[in-house]
Image (tube, rainbow, N blue to C red):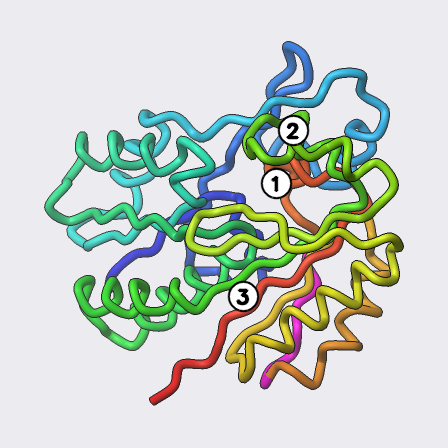
Amino acid sequence: MVKIVTDSTADIPPELGADISVMPCFIQFGTASFRDGVDITREQFYARLTTCDELPKTASPSAGMFEEVYRRVAGDSEVISLHLADALSGVCNAARVGAQAVAPERITVFDSESVTMGLGWLCLAAARAARAGLSRAQILALLDQMKTRVHVFAAPDTLEFLRRSGRVGWASAMVGQFLRIKPVVGVYRGVVRSIDRVRTRARSIQRLVELVTELGRLESLAVLHTTAQEAALQLAREVAHLAPQPIPVVEVTPVIGTHVGPNGLGLAAVVAHET
């Protein structure tokens, strides 16, 4: 059976991805480095984020760490390693170097072109296909088609954390325009874009609902949040009719939360495949 590997930015609820190997990314506060989900919990991370003077740094697992997990996971099997958008991180590159050192003919590194549960939905689909006995080539074809249907929308409480991260050029250019309004952003095919600017929190949440509704029929939907559990549960109730299955409510990994900041909300949707 094809083995599936990802990184901790996938945000897969543990009960859904038991057969997926997850590589922890790193968060660094000053000189202290933590493995995401191993050395620091999400609760601990967000408590520190709201009080720290300097934005924490994030880093991908090293190529050596990927080499180690591939040797452990692969055996005589083939591997598909799905990761955070290559345009936004160095994770895919580290994974490629690790794969090259182990068995490049049996390990494929796949750029999800997405983040958080956008990546997570792709991982879960790959794992289902692997359990069903599909070949590596068949699963990769499925993923290539599926990632064109994955959309992530977010309503950060402020643009400040995205600006400070330096990962998105337009965030710094537009920060003056966002001082008294709420940004709404989207991630699609590895590009983070500004979708809207609204005046209130309530309107930003309404825009999330409108954006996901405009996608049409969905096959999967998740609600995302950063320290906004109650608001996320309410949002899940509002969009429940759009999804054919229960909607997971996920607190976003610290590696993504560093750039979003606290009190953010989001949606990760997969548009239904038209046959």
- Label 2 vs 1, first from the N-terminus: 2
Looking at the image, which residue is at 18% across and 33% down?
100
Tell me the tag on residue 16. Answer: 3
Query: Disc 2 on helix, strand or loop?
Result: helix
Depth check: give the residue in front, 143 or 209: 209
Q: Nearer the viewer, residue 24 or 202?
A: 202
Of the two numbered discs 2 and 3 on the same chain, state the one appearing first in sequence. 3
Viewport quadrant of the C terminus: bottom left
- Position of the N terminus, as image quadrant, is bottom left
Q: Is residue 238 on the magenta stretch?
A: no
Mark 3 and mark 1 lie on one chain; the one further toward the N terminus is 3
Q: Is residue 249 magenta?
A: yes
- Residue 256, disc: 1
Give the amino acid type for the residue marked by disc 1 in the picture: Ile
Task: Tell me the residue at 77%/37% (across/down).
Answer: 177
Q: Secondary structure at mark 3?
A: loop
- Report the amino acid beneath label 2: Ser
Q: Is residue 120 above or below residue 27?
A: below
Q: Quadrant of residue 141?
A: bottom left
Q: Going by the image, does 179 lie left or right of 25?
A: right
SS of the residue under disc 1: helix
* Residue 161, placed above or below residue 138: above
User: Which residue was labeled with disc 2?
Assistant: 172
| Position of 33 relative to 40 (above/below) | above
Camera-side residue: 173 or 211? Answer: 173
